[in-house]
Amino acid sequence: MNTLALKVFTALALILLVESASEDQKRYDNYSVYKIRHPNQLQRQLLHKLTKQHESFSLWHESREEIHLMVSPQALPELGKYLNKTYARSNMFISNVQELIDNEQALNMKARFGPTVNWKRYNTLSEIEAWLDDILIRYPGVTEGFILGKSFEGRNIRGLKISYKTGNPGVFIESNIHANEWITSASATWMINQLLSSADKQVREMAESHDWYIVPVLNVDGFVYSHEKDRLWRKTRQPSAISSCIGVDPNRNYDSYWMVSGASNDPCEWTYAGPHALSEPEIKAMSDFVSSIKDKLNVMLAFHSYSQLLLSPFGHTDEKVPENYDDLMQVAKAYGDAVKALPYGTVFRYGSSAEILYPVSGSTKDWAYNEQDIKISYTVEFRDTGKFGFVLPPSHIIPNAEEALAGIEALLRECKKLGYLQLKYKV
Ligand SMILES: *[C@@H]1O[C@H](CO)[C@@H](O)[C@H](O)[C@H]1NC(C)=O
Ligand SMILES: *[C@@H]1O[C@H](CO)[C@@H](O)[C@H](O)[C@H]1NC(C)=O
Ligand SMILES: [Zn+2]
């Protein structure tokens, strides 16, 4: 084939791939996303009421300052009415969600012609797993695979332990518990690669003086579903006994102040906590695994997107704060300062969930803190703050991952200074 023919052929193959991939996927044509600023109590209530119509509205983000709400084109007049009636201050920041998804998919397909896992695109679960297998072969002395357990659909939930020597404090990284937050597993895999292969002195020092337990994709069923059927799928995939709506918000399903606050008992909502604590096999598996090694863990980090926040306990109440609250703030500040110092200048805010976001109970960081005695425990909400939201273009993967690495390095340094990295077990 000559070059032109090859180009045409490649272009055609690309189109075919994009089309076959998107054949039976849920579409978000002309779905828009609105930012409602400084909502008052009434506005908040009304917007929450709207999200009960789950086909038309989804709550992308909620904090004390802002609500981000996705709306179908059919329901737009209804939203307009509410916004007008309550004098809400709002603006649209995404006019067509499908366009973002299409752009992402085209880039994913284009980058696919290169070598596997290259962080220029978002990888599927099977690609991530093949890459993990490769890592285990390439770094046999210092890596070890582990399996948390099986998902509802019977998939293995895999993790990687990295340990250069005995007697290290342990850091656990949970990622992609929310299926649609693809930037989390992309960043986690990039970090694994850095921990194993970086020649940078500081990175080597950090990599080799901690034991790492990293689960790149915890919600495996949801992640596969988000790749194959619905880009915005967030929850697990276990059906409900009381509703036709599928799945549970796994980050409300841990057994710690379950359903106390900021969680829903409506299976159709994004924050459905499940029929009971640990109802989801993925969360039960994670819970059992972490309990079994909790003496080895000093730090728990749960990767999420989006909103550029470091959230510490408590989530279930804003009426009291953890006893080491000041330390948690100091450590979070170190993370934020390190990220800000990079050339991108990205700003991360920090505080307890109940303070800066909203009450939320049954999440990983609260469970790890309250029930597993891991006193350094955060939710890390990655880029951005509401331009692309969950559909963050792949060009952000490496910058975001660099921020995570620099942030975690600073966080661990601060933890050490404050005495949080002392061993809880006998070597
Ligand atoms: C989306 O909106 C555009 C502009 O209003 C319109 O031309 C197009 O048909 C709409 N697409 C769908 C699938 O409804
Ligand atoms: C909201 O108010 C604006 C300005 O008063 C008006 O132009 C617009 O049509 C209203 N929208 C709805 C959906 O009522
Ligand atoms: Zn999340």
Image (tube, rainbow, N blue to C red):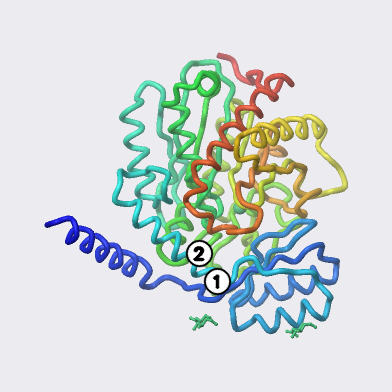
Q: Is residue 253 left or right of residue 49?
A: left
Residue at the image point whose x is 41% and y is 23% from the top:
142
Which picture quadrant has residue 147? top left
Lateral position of residue 25 relative to residue 348, left or right = left
Q: Which mark is residue 96?
A: 1
Say what amino acid the circle numbered 2 marks.
Leu
Label 2: how many Cα within 10 Å (few below 14, some 14–19, many 20+): some
User: Is 257 drawn above or below residue 139 in the view shown?
Assistant: below
Ligand 1 closer than 8 Å to the CB at disc 2?
Answer: no
**Amino acid under label 1?**
Asn
Vertically, is 74 above or below 116? below
Query: In which quadrant of the rendered image does the N terminus lie?
Result: bottom left
Compare residues 394 and 390 and report the one nearer the observer.
394
> In x, y percent, where is residue 172?
56, 34
Instruction: Name which quarter of the figure residue 6 lies in.
Output: bottom left
According to the picture, the residue beneath numbered tag 2 turns out to be 100
Q: Is residue 105 left or right of residue 385?
A: left
Cβ–Cβ under 8 Å for marks 2 and 1: yes
Picture coordinates of residue 297, whole percent (x, y)? 60, 28
**Between marks 2 and 1, how big is the CA–CA gap?**
7 Å
Residue 128 in the figure: left or right of residue 185: left
Which residue lies at the image location 60% right of the left edge and 67% below the top edge?
Answer: 94
- Seen from the viewer's position, the closer of residues 207 and 164 is 207
Residue 10, compared with residue 176, is above or below; it is below
Question: In which quadrant is the C terminus drawn?
Answer: top right
Placement of 50 over or under 316, stated as above or below: below
Q: Which of 333 and 156 is in front in this view?
A: 333
Picture quadrant of ligand 2? bottom right
